[in-house]
Image (tube, rainbow, N blue to C red):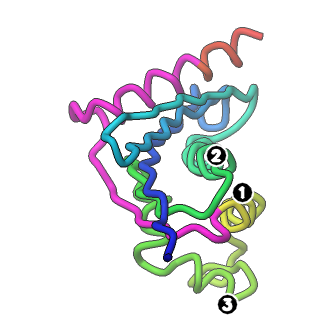
């Protein structure tokens, strides 16, 4: 008997107060079991000195690192940087070119891209971009989590 793959939705957003400056991410993981029961967890963390792009990547990493078995993961983000890295094949090109962009300059945030790839191992990922601050409920919740974490990191 073939085991069905678990489907999870990962919503994510990142924020920074200044670029660089205090920042944070917010992530929601949602799973609906076969009986229709919804399981959901929220995660957030702040950092005293970071960038918005780093927090966008960290939000996805944080969610993926919480998964304990291979899943089909639908990642919903308002970060074109993150979504396009996968949907437009940038990440494969960066790896093939020893982490250099099409301009032959080193890719920024390589440490996090590599961590994201490691966290993605064994999962089937699907990325969807949503417009930020446009009323998409879970994206708005992730934004609130991320900005609260950034504010807390900046207050320390």
Q: Position of residue 77 (x, y in %)?
A: 41, 49
Of all residues shown, which one is farthest toward the bottom?
Answer: 96
Q: Secondary structure at mark 1?
A: helix
- With 111 as the anchor, is 69 left or right in this view? left
Q: Are marks 2 and 1 in contact (CB under 8 Å)?
A: yes
Question: Could you say which is closer to the camera, residue 88 or residue 4?
Answer: 4
Pick the residue in front: 32 or 118.
Answer: 32
> Given the current orientation, which residue lies at the most extreme left position?
135
* Sequence-earlier tag: 2 or 1: 2
Q: Which residue is mark 2?
A: 58
Gap between marks 2 and 3, in whole Å?
A: 23 Å
Seen at 29% across and 49% down, the residue is 130
Indicate whether residue 128 is drawn in magenta.
Answer: yes
Q: Residue at horizontal 60%, vertical 15%?
A: 151
What's the mark number on residue 39? none
Which residue bears the numbered disc 3?
96
Q: Place residue 83 in its image quadrant.
A: bottom left
Q: Which residue corresponds to the image point at 55% horizontal and 46% vertical from the top-left?
A: 56
Image quarter of residue 43: top right
Q: Earlier in the sequence, mark 2 or mark 3?
A: 2
User: Left or right: where does residue 73 sit relative to residue 106?
Assistant: left
Task: Please tell me whether mark 3 sits on a helix, a strand or a loop.
Answer: helix
Task: Tell me the number on the disc at residue 112.
Answer: 1
Per the model, the C-alpha gap separating discs 2 and 1 is 7 Å
Magenta residues span: 120-148
């Amino acid at each position: 008997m073939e085991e069905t793959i678990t489907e999870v939705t990962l919503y994510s957003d990142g924020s920074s107060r200044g670029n660089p400056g205090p920042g944070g991410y917010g992530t929601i993981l949602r799973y609906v079991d076969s009986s229709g029961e919804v399981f959901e967890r929220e995660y957030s963390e702040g950092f005293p000195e970071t960038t918005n792009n780093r927090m966008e990547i960290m939000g996805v990493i944080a969610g993926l690192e919480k998964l304990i078995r291979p899943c089909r993961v639908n990642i919903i983000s308002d970060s074109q940087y993150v979504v396009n890295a996968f949907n437009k094949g940038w990440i494969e090109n960066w790896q093939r070119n020893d982490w250099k962009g099409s301009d032959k300059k080193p890719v920024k945030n390589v440490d996090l891209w590599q961590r994201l790839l490691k966290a993605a191992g064994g999962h089937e990922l699907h990325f969807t971009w949503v417009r930020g601050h446009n009323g998409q409920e879970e994206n708005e919740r992730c934004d609130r989590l991320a900005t609260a974490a950034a504010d807390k990191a900046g207050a320390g």
